[in-house]
Amino acid sequence: MSTQETEAPTTSAAPEAPDAPQIAVVDPASGRVIQHVPDLDAEAVRRAAERGRAVQPAWAALGFEGRARILRRAQKWVVDHREEIIRTVVSETGKVWEDAQLADYGYGAAAFGFWADNAEKYLAEERVKSASPMSKGKKLLIRYEPLGLVGVIGPWNYPLANSVGDAIPALAAGNSVLLKPSEETPLTSLLMERALLECGMPEGVFQVVTGRGQTGAALIDVVDMIMFTGSTRTGKLVAKAAAEALIPCSLELGGKDAMVVLADADLDRAANQAVFYSMFNAGQTCVSVERVYVEAPVYDAFVAKVVEKARTLRSGVEPSGPGATDVGALTFPPQLETVRRHVDQAREAGATIAVGGNPPEGPGLFYPPTVLTNVDHSMEAMTEETFGPTLPIMKVADVEEAIKMANDSPYGLMASVFTKDAEKGEAVARRLEAGMVHVNAVLMGYLSLELPMGGWKTSGVGARHGVGGIRKYTKTQSIVVSSRMNLKREPYEYPYTGTGYKLVGALNKFLYGRGRRD
């Protein structure tokens, strides 16, 4: 990464706001300012919305195949520009190159093609067969139309996967999109705006509006639907604003994902997965392993394996290239304080810090990989989203206690269970209160774009991926066509003579009044 500040890509709205205040984009691993982007106001967002609305009908008129051609070009662009994408992601997030490749680059490379291939299938017209006798001889259809202008407010932890990634199905459905990335990590979104223009997307269909909170608030006021990824606290504010605007919203919010390790688990695999998915992206993943419950007979053995693996992890240095380090920096400065607070509070409450726990001196937002034992639910490290490289491990008596403790949370995004008995694992999975549960794996279901991924409880509303992940960006229209056997006058129409009343009453009794025998 260059130590020199370079000229930032510009948003579509930026040329019309030359005097907008600037936001410094800082490399969290070094503390260096790498670029500046505009902090756009409500008027700039309104103008961007006007442009998006003006071009949306022509974008929708291209049809699924016309839009798919551009999305497939974007897929190739992502593959051809791998190093540039990864370098950009690393520079603004502080994550290591391997994390950026696996999550952000890898997701983008898959998602453009997936939605190009599946949008038409997921949004095809549906013929409906009705049980109502009043619908006999009529053609019943459900069709899906783009909402128009979709707003996406993205998080700072995955600037391609969870920001641009949410825009892709909205575009595939025929919408224009305004994307407001986090002010901490706007550069990847700007890069992808450039990419889509180079791939032939009409100007104005996909626009990036950079800015702080007021920019996101202004976005909600001008769009037809909002997709938000972030904290539960902010998500509630977004939902309230969307309700005031009377527009739909989809929210992917916080998580405190539980891993359950049963006595018959493959402990090596479970330990490897626990360490990797708690420390991946420095733990800044909504669906990371944030707490582990281990049955007592294998608790000590599991902890020993985790500690051995965690002690080998390298951290605290700039991710200068592939293989340079294992765990990168935290991206958002306040997050470092949250991690400190959770670990320190747990330590004061009696937890044992088996690995890590002491942040290094020097530049960069680093916190070492940290394993905590002797923990319980009196500690924030076990109950609140830490979003950092920590792994608290709690001993439980049996599977029933594990399930009870795993469900003792306001969150319900993802969970996992490890056991050599796959049937038992599935049975436990069905009892865990989370929108996605894995057996003998973690997080991989997120990469299966056919599967809906959404949270239960306070972890969100709606889902990304799967059929619902694109239909949420559409409005439905039901069509009823009466073309055959049309009477001049239906028996229930005016004038009311009493005969029609008796006829309809007899018909209802015949159809519904006979009851059913079990």
Image (cartoon, rainbow, N blue to C red):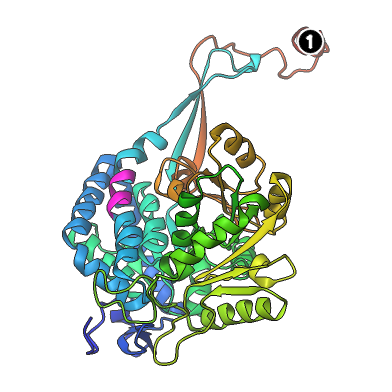
What residue is at 23 percent from the left and 89 percent from the top? 3
- Specify whether residue 157 is painted magenta: no
Q: Which residue is mark 1?
A: 516
Amino acid type, label 1 = Arg
Residue 292 pos. (x, y %): 60, 58
Instruction: Name the one closer to the observer, 43 or 7.
Output: 7
Magenta part, dominant SS: helix
| The N terminus - image quarter | bottom left
What residue is at 30 percent from the left and 41 percent from the top? 64
- The magenta segment is 109-114
Q: Is residue 497 above or below residue 112?
A: above
Q: Is residue 496 above or below residue 275?
A: above
Q: Secondary structure at mark 1?
A: loop
Q: Decide if residue 113 is on the left or right side of residue 468.
A: left
Report which quarter residue 192 is drawn in.
bottom left
| The C terminus - image quarter | top right
Instruction: Name the one closer to the observer, 51 or 310.
Output: 310
Residue 507 pos. (x, y %): 76, 9
Residue 513 pos. (x, y %): 82, 11
Report which quarter residue 247 is drawn in.
bottom right
What residue is at 54 percent from the left and 12 percent from the top? 137
Q: Is residue 282 above or below residue 38?
A: above
